[in-house]
Amino acid sequence: MKRREFLKSSAAAALGLGAGTLPIRAAGNLEKDLLELRTYHFAEEEKRLAFERFLARAAVPALNRVGVRPVGAWKLLKEDNPKLAEVPLDIYVLLPHKSMESVLTLIDRLAEDPWFVSEAESIIAAPPSDPAYTRFESALLLAFDGFPRVQVPTLSGSRLAQLRIYESPTDERALAKIDMFNNGGELDIFKKTGLTPVFFGQRLIGSGMPNLTYMLSFPDKAAMQKAWRAFGRHPDWRRLSKDPQYADTVSHITNLVLRPCAGSQI
């Protein structure tokens, strides 16, 4: 295969968006977003910084041109996550899709963008002995009925995000926790107390299942702390948290505080 054709067919792989073209097609837009949540791992800080620059310069604009927006990209800082013994050199990327077709054809559409292919060459053609990133993980989520589309609560320069994953002991308890948000009133309590969501999603494919995954965004750390205090004291939450139909729905919580990377649109 000629180098140019290789770069064209491989460009989307720089975003970890799959291994090739899938023959399946799904027609029409969904009423809820399909969310690709990706985690890239890096061997050193300089590699992470280079990938962050690539996202801002090339990947995010190209994704927008093919209808994937808003694109979120975040990193972890030690000062925001003091409970972590070691803060990994990771970048989290959120890709909202309006249809399954968008998910399945994203590689094809990015590969037809010559500017993106050219800009991505330094990432996708990195030597095997010195790759741009070591590995990536991916998850596919379906947005909740009660929060069907990704939202952007703030673009403050001091903003931060919370990525929270609620693992459940069984599928039935996982569905009960989702119902607690959609129909039990937990989403409404979030909004009343300043816990401003970016997305809520049921994990369809990925690790740690069954789980639901959601993200909140705040203009600064003080706003985050104030909102959680208000949530814990809110009478509606105190009542809801004691409802027996929602007992034992969460067996483990992952809580990460993230800062936006350059070029993040969330």
Image (cartoon, rainbow, N blue to C red):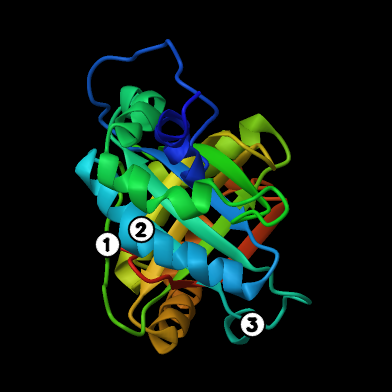
CA–CA distance in space, label 3 to label 1: 24 Å
Residue for point 59% across, 73% down: 46
How crowded pointer 3 is (Cα within 10 Å; few <14, some 14-19, many 20+) is rated as some
On residue 79, the disc is none
Closer to us: mark 3 or mark 1? 3
Closer to us: mark 3 or mark 2? 3
**Residue identified by numbered label 1:** 152
**Residue identified by numbered label 2:** 198
**Residue identified by numbered label 3:** 78
User: Mark 2 or mark 1, which has the lower sequence index?
Assistant: 1
Residue 82 quadrant: bottom right
Find residue 99 and report its horizontal and vertical position in percent: 30, 27
Residue 106 in the figure: left or right of residue 40: left
Callout 1, which amino acid?
Answer: Val
Residue 72 in the figure: left or right of residue 155: right
Residue for point 50% across, 53% down: 123
